[in-house]
Image (cartoon, rainbow, N blue to C red):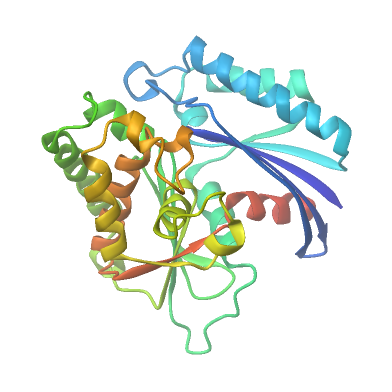
Amino acid sequence: MRIAVVDVGTNTTRLYVAEVHGDRVARELTRKSRVTRLGADVDASGELAPAALEREYAALDTFAAHLRVEGYDRAVAVMTSAVRDAANGRQFAQEVAGRYGFEVHVLSGEQEARLTYRGATDQLAPDPAGAATLVFDIGGGSTELVIGRGPEPDFHVSTQAGVVRQADRHIHDDPPTPEQLRAVAGDVRAVLERAVPLQRRVRPARAIGVAGTPTSLAAMAQRLEPYDPARVHGYRLSAAERDGIFERMAAMPLADRQRVPGLHPDRAAAILPGIVILTEVMRLFTLDEVEVSEHDILRGAALHYAAG
């Protein structure tokens, strides 16, 4: 089956097309991404803003045009934090279904976490000793933390920590002041500590980070120009590398961050809160490094919906 998945996120909207045979991805055909900031100000206003919707529809128009040329057997749109939190989120989902003909799913936090875990681990051999794997997805409006010891997770939580949400709450200067960045860290730390019980804050055998913050950091650490998914996937990002990048970028205005090798200019506005969230996740689980993965909710959704 050729399946198309559109991931409508709080910060980024992405298109993924793959050939799925049985329970495996046989071939990845398309990966496209647009930073739309659909969830800008949702935390404060409770609604998707008209300007954000215009940006979103422009991205979806482009993706729909691509799909008309490439073709597909099934097209699914999955929508996450911004849409499920917004008062007008369901109306937007219905509009997307009617306008583009996509099969639309507004995911719960649990569904989002499970699809992320499946995408990140579907090619991994289970640890023979039954050791735990942590998968975390730093999104625009939420961060998902999932722990498992095989194909199925046994703990998952979707938290209200996201690069757009925390930036809207705390960052008001360019570059952000140290006090603003400390406010992001304090907010995120409190959110994560409320969400993850003490008995689950155990260092896992394997920790896998997906989505824009870890992949951007892996690209920046290697100064990749242009971005190379093959060199990002599987990269082991150390805490020292993370901190070095953060220290350099925290003093830069946005215009300078947009020119940093390895960082897409559209991600420059959200990278600092993203690094803070990554730091707090690593602190919570006492991690010295994380494995960066290109396999995420897109792959998990393709496998899940291709099966029925």
> In the image shown, does 157 or 281 lie closer to the viewer?
281
Residue 273, horizontal then vertical, whole percent: 30, 40
Identify which residue is drawn at 39% across, 19% down: 46
Residue 224, horizontal then vertical, whole percent: 50, 54
Residue 204, horizontal then vertical, whole percent: 37, 74
Q: In the displayed structure, would residue 258 be above or below residue 127?
A: above
Q: In the displayed structure, would residue 307 be above or below residue 71?
A: below
Give the quadrant of residue 43: top left
Query: Is residue 191 at all visible to an observer of this figure?
Result: yes
Residue that lies at the very extreme toward the bottom in this rendered image: 129
Q: From the viewer's perspective, tell me whether residue 149 is left or right of residue 124.
A: left
Identify which residue is drawn at 61% across, 62% down: 230
Give the quadrant of residue 73: top right
Q: In the displayed structure, would residue 24 be above or below residue 127?
A: above
Query: Is residue 161 at all visible to an observer of this figure?
Result: no
Residue 32, horizontal then vertical, whole percent: 66, 40
Identify which residue is drawn at 40% across, 41% down: 142
Q: From the viewer's perspective, tell me whether residue 87 is left or right of residue 106.
A: left
Q: From the viewer's perspective, tell me whether residue 239 is left or right of residue 297.
A: left
> In the image shown, does 125 or 172 lie closer to the viewer?
172
Identify which residue is drawn at 55% across, 54% down: 116
